[in-house]
Image (cartoon, rainbow, N blue to C red):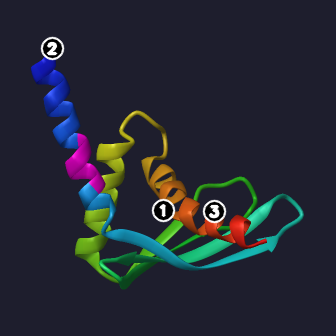
Amino acid sequence: MKNIIAKLASIEQKLLKIASKWTVKDMNYDETHRGIAWDCKILKDGKVVGHCENRGYGGANSYRFTDKEAEKEFHELANKKYRHVAEPEAELMEELIKPLEDKLKNSL
């Protein structure tokens, strides 16, 4: 059992290290008649590699990547970290956006 726990901890540390390469910036919000729309740039190692948006109508996020290798890595990371949810990319985006939202809340 200890061996399994150690392996899981090692995998978790590797995922955290990979995830730390990813950030978002330039968050924009807009109120719609059905919710809150938002968009942002997706960065890997400080370089813009894509864009994500949600139109605020209850649908899924839309992703556009300018770097195909980064796009592949983003989807692989999401599927490794959140393999038990219906939209793993959306969960990863929530994780990346949270620090920005926290910073905004703290500045108010």
Disc 3 versus disc 1: distance between alpha carbons?
11 Å
**What element does badge 3 sit on?**
helix
Three-letter code, disc 2: Met
Disc 2 versus disc 3: distance between alpha carbons?
37 Å
10 Å neighbourhood of mark 3: few (<14), some, or many (≥20)?
few
The quarter of the displayed image where residue 105 is located: bottom right
Give percent across and percent down for residue 70.
28, 72
User: Which residue carries the number 3 mark?
Assistant: 102
**What element does badge 2 sit on?**
loop
User: Which residue carries the number 1 mark?
Assistant: 96
Relative to 97, 38 lies left or right: right
Magenta stretch holds residue 66? no
Tag 2–tag 1 contact (CB < 8 Å): no
User: Which residue carries the number 2 mark?
Assistant: 1
Three-letter code, disc 3: Asp
Give percent across and percent down for residue 26.
58, 83
| Residue farthest right in this picture | 33
**Nearest to viewer (mark 2 / mark 1):** 2
Which residue is rendered at x = 77% and y = 64% of the image?
36
Q: Which residues are magenta?
A: 12-16
Q: Earlier in the sequence, mark 3 or mark 1?
A: 1
Q: Which mark is residue 12?
A: none
Relative to 99, 55 lies left or right: right
Give percent across and percent down for residue 19.
32, 59
**Compared to 100, does 6 lie above or below?**
above
**What element does badge 1 sit on?**
helix
> Between residues 95 and 53, which one lies in front from this camera angle?
95
The quarter of the displayed image where residue 42 is located: bottom left
| Residue farthest top in this picture | 1
Relative to 37, 80 lies left or right: left
Disc 2 versus disc 1: distance between alpha carbons?
32 Å
